[in-house]
Image (cartoon, rainbow, N blue to C red):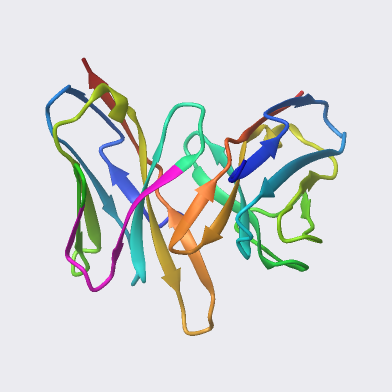
Amino acid sequence: DAGITQSPRYKITETGRQVTLMCHQTWSHSYMFWYRQDLGHGLRLIYYSAAADITDKGEVPDGYVVSRSKTENFPLTLESATRSQTSVYFCASGAYNEQFFGPGTRLTVL
Amino acid sequence: SQQGEEDPQALSIQEGENATMNCSYKTSINNLQWYRQNSGRGLVHLILIRSNEREKHSGRLRVTLDTSKKSSSLLITASRAADTASYFCATDWSNAGNNRKLIWGLGTSLAVNP
């Protein structure tokens, strides 16, 4: 199916563990984005990618790592999860004039 | 820091009424976009208005942009229960150094009561 998918949809982990959130899009969009959404903060950009093998930091990149070896995939890794990283994570693809969002991953760090 | 600020934060209306929400921003923009987010879902792009446009329509949506006041409004006419969602504005900003980003507001939560 065409679109943008995220997995897992829900994840509970413990402090200090590594977690990878997956994002896959079928449109061949050059740009992909990772956001976190928290009450009171709205959407905040973590990392973005302009093309395969090109990534750059957003507003809140600390504690996160991304890679983009293929155009269609943009995984986000929390190297050592902390409670402050409990959030809903959204992946998006598209461009600055229109972004298409995945359904989100709700991550809880205990 | 967030550039877009929506108001009101929350709005509750009856079906059939019009809903108006506003967005203010701080610096020059390329365009302004409105997105909708249904509970537990990702955001969906609704409409884009360029910085040289003053008004745009799409179905029951009407967006205005006043660059002198750095503000935009989204009007949903004849609202339906299915319009219940959060609405976000996002401003497309860039500078001479080719830095570019979307800056998101905190959203307006709209409840349309049947």
Percent across and percent down for residue A98 are 45, 58
Name the chief secondary structure element in magenta.
Answer: strand
Most foreground residue, B95 or B44: B44
Residue at 87% across / 34% down in the picture?
A16
Q: Residue furthest front?
A: A1
Left of A53 or right of it: where is B42? left
Q: Residue furthest top?
A: B114
Residue at 22% across / 17% down in the picture?
B113
Quadrant for the N terminus of chain A in the image: top right
Percent across and percent down for residue A59 are 60, 57
Quadrant for the C terminus of chain A in the image: top right
Q: Report the span colored magenta.
A: B44-57
Percent across and percent down for residue A80 are 85, 40
Is residue A45 shown above or below A50?
above
Is residue B110 shown above or below A89?
above
Specify the quadrant of the image occupied by residue B59: top left
Left of B85 or right of it: where is A75? right
Residue at 64% across / 51% down in the picture?
A26
Is residue A11 shown above or below B97?
above
Specify the quadrant of the image occupied by residue A93: bottom right
Residue B87 makes an appearance in the image? yes
Residue B1 makes an appearance in the image? no
Number of on-image labels: 0
Task: Determine if the magenta segment contains residue B55.
Answer: yes
Task: Determine if the magenta segment contains residue A50.
Answer: no
Q: Residue furthest right?
A: A17
Residue at 74% across / 42% down in the picture?
A22
Percent across and percent down for residue B111 are 28, 24
Is residue B101 shown above or below A17?
below
